[in-house]
């Protein structure tokens, strides 16, 4: 029982042996137990004593709490690990794990991973969509496993593996155009084009007056289309063509030896930063062809900064720096030379020319408005006209417009006479388009090595027309040599 029973009253302890012993001990010291609280105590000693007691008490209390807290932390950590194993963690793409590999902590907690309830309890915002990296890897793996045949069957079944970009959108236009294509009609079109006449004395006065600066007297240039450079008074054989491309293009001859300075002055004034040069056995001496070589053509500094050869093609690419004397801002002309293209003929590889016409369209769509593209051949007519005509046809086909080569060539000839100067070149425009249609129908997802399906209607028709036009040209050549006639071959 306590010493206090009621407030304000004190109960006297009953006499006992323990009390007597205390009193006896106290009596030996001449004090009693009740007199101890009255004894004066040093404040500093009392404070130190209380601090020591509180420290001891706190130590005794904290230790068991720490153990409990440690157990709780371990329990929380285990719960968090289980949640991480089953819940995808939102993170940046750079820190996201490889979706094709399983993290070690997930493997160690298969019992938690197989539990479908934990992810369902989390808010929807904690479940991020799959990262772009994982989606691209899965897409690449699926594309690599598919073949053109399997992709076609998946598209028929409405599978998501094939999108609308898998098939060329110009297919219907190409189909309608090929149904109208016929070699005999093509030959008749060319014969009508050959009836076009040019009044040289009236329409080509400037060209005639500068005969020594022209490659030939048989390839006139119209005064109305010759380029006019405000800072130049010299004559240059380059014409400006308005054709149905993204913008006008320039077409011209290879400069005559001794006129290189005038030529590069015009290039700088016109800012012709893209040049396609079509040559066969002709010598090209109006710019240095080795990297880091430079030549001063009068006041024009021409420096070859880079040379690149395209493997598998007769194509060389040069980066030519052009700088007039007294100026500090040069221009870079990207010169693409296509070799092995003989006069009055076509390049033996249709793929090479088609690829470069597409490159021309890309240049016209991406270059600044003040820059121009120039197509050159020895006379700036036959091969250069073929290149521009094919570029227009490819551009129109991609725009779902059926190209009309008779109108395309007629339009160019009204601005640059004798463009596309032989039946072989004119018929090869059709053959080049057949090749382009076949490649576009075969190409899937940008795979340049995609195999063509021989049962595809477009490919089948393109191959059939290619053979017919090729045989027609061979028969025409043989007829001109007195060996056979085209009519006899076509009847067979």
Image (cartoon, helix red, strand yellow):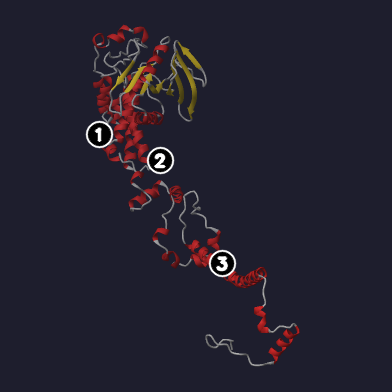
User: Which one is in front, 58 or 377?
Assistant: 58
Left or right side of 486 for 353: right
What's the distance in space between the residues labelled 2 and 1, CA to CA? 29 Å
Rendering coords of residue 152 (x, y %): 36, 48
For the residues labelled 1 and 3, the Cα–Cα distance comes to: 80 Å
Q: Residue 406: image x %, image y %?
A: 25, 26
Residue 74 is tagged as 3
Q: Residue at x 36, y 38 (%)?
A: 440
Nearer the observer, 332 or 15: 15
Mark toward the viewer: 3 or 2: 3
Is label 2 or label 1 in front? 2
Residue at 38% from the left image edge and 21% from the top image edge: 272
**Which of the 4 image quarters holds residue 438?**
top left
The local crowd at label 3, few if under 14, some if 14 to 19, many if 20 or more residues have their Cα within 10 Å, is few
The C terminus lies in which quarter of the figure?
top left
- On screen, residue 27 versus residue 373, left or right, reads right
Residue 180: numbered disc = 1
Q: CA distance from mark 3 to mark 2?
A: 54 Å
**300 over 340 or under it: above or below:** above
Residue occupying image coordinates x 31% and y 35%: 398
One can see residue 483 in this view? no
Dots 3 and 2: beta carbons under 8 Å?
no
Q: Which residue is mark 2?
A: 446
Identify the secondary structure beneath mark 2. loop
Relative to 186, does residue 36 appear above or below in the rendering?
below
**Is label 3 in a helix, a strand or a loop?**
helix
Say whether residue 243 is left or right of residue 277: left
**In the picture, which quadrant includes the N terminus?**
bottom right
Query: Which badge, 2 or 1, comes first in the chain's sequence?
Result: 1
Is the C-beta separation of discs 2 and 1 under 8 Å?
Answer: no
Graded by Cα atoms within 10 Å as few (under 14), some (14 to 19) or many (20 or more), the crowding at tag 1 reads few
């Amino acid at each position: 029982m306590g010493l206090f029973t009621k407030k304000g009253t004190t109960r006297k302890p009953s006499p006992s042996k323990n009390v007597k012993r205390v009193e006896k001990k106290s009596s030996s010291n001449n004090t009693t137990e009740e007199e101890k609280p009255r004894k004066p105590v040093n404040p500093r000693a009392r404070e130190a004593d209380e601090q020591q007691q509180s420290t001891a008490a706190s130590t005794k209390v904290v230790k068991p709490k720490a153990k409990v807290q440690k157990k709780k932390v371990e329990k929380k950590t285990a719960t968090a690990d289980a949640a991480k194993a089953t819940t995808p963690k939102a993170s940046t793409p750079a820190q996201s794990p490889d979706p094709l590999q399983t993290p070690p902590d997930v493997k160690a907690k298969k019992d938690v991973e197989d539990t479908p309830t934990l992810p369902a309890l989390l808010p929807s915002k904690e479940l991020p969509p799959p990262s772009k990296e994982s989606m691209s890897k899965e897409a690449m793996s699926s594309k690599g496993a598919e073949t053109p045949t399997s992709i076609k069957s998946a598209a028929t079944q409405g599978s998501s593996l094939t999108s609308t970009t898998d098939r060329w959108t110009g297919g219907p236009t190409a189909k309608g155009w090929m149904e109208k294509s016929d070699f005999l009609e093509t030959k008749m079109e060319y014969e009508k084009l050959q009836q076009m006449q040019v009044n040289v004395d009236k329409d080509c006065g400037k060209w005639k007056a500068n005969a020594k600066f022209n490659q030939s007297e048989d390839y006139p240039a119209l005064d109305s289309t010759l380029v006019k450079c405000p800072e130049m008074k010299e004559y240059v054989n380059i014409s400006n063509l308005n054709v149905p491309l993204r913008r006008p293009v320039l077409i011209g001859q290879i400069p005559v030896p001794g006129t290189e300075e005038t030529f590069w002055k015009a290039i700088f004034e016109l800012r012709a930063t893209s040049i396609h040069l079509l040559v066969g056995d002709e010598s090209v001496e109006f710019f240095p062809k080795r990297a880091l070589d430079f030549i001063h053509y009068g006041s024009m500094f021409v420096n070859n900064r880079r040379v690149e050869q395209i493997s598998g093609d007769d194509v060389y690419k040069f980066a030519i720096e052009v700088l007039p004397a007294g100026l500090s801002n040069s221009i870079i002309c990207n010169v693409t030379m296509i070799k092995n293209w003989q006069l009055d003929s076509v390049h033996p590889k249709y793929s090479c020319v088609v690829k470069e016409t597409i490159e021309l369209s890309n240049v016209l769509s991406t270059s600044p408005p003040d820059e121009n593209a120039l197509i050159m051949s020895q006379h700036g007519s036959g091969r250069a006209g073929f290149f521009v005509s094919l570029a227009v046809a490819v551009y129109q086909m991609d725009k779902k417009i059926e190209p009309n080569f008779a109108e395309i060539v007629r339009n160019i000839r009204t601005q640059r006479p004798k463009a596309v100067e032989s039946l072989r070149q004119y018929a090869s425009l059709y053959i080049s388009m057949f090749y382009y249609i076949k490649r576009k129908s075969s190409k899937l997802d940008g795979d340049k090595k995609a195999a063509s399906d021989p049962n595809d209607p477009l490919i089948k028709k393109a191959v059939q027309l290619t053979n017919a036009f090729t045989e027609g040209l061979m028969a025409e050549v043989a007829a001109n040599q007195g060996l056979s006639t085209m009519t006899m071959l076509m009847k067979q």
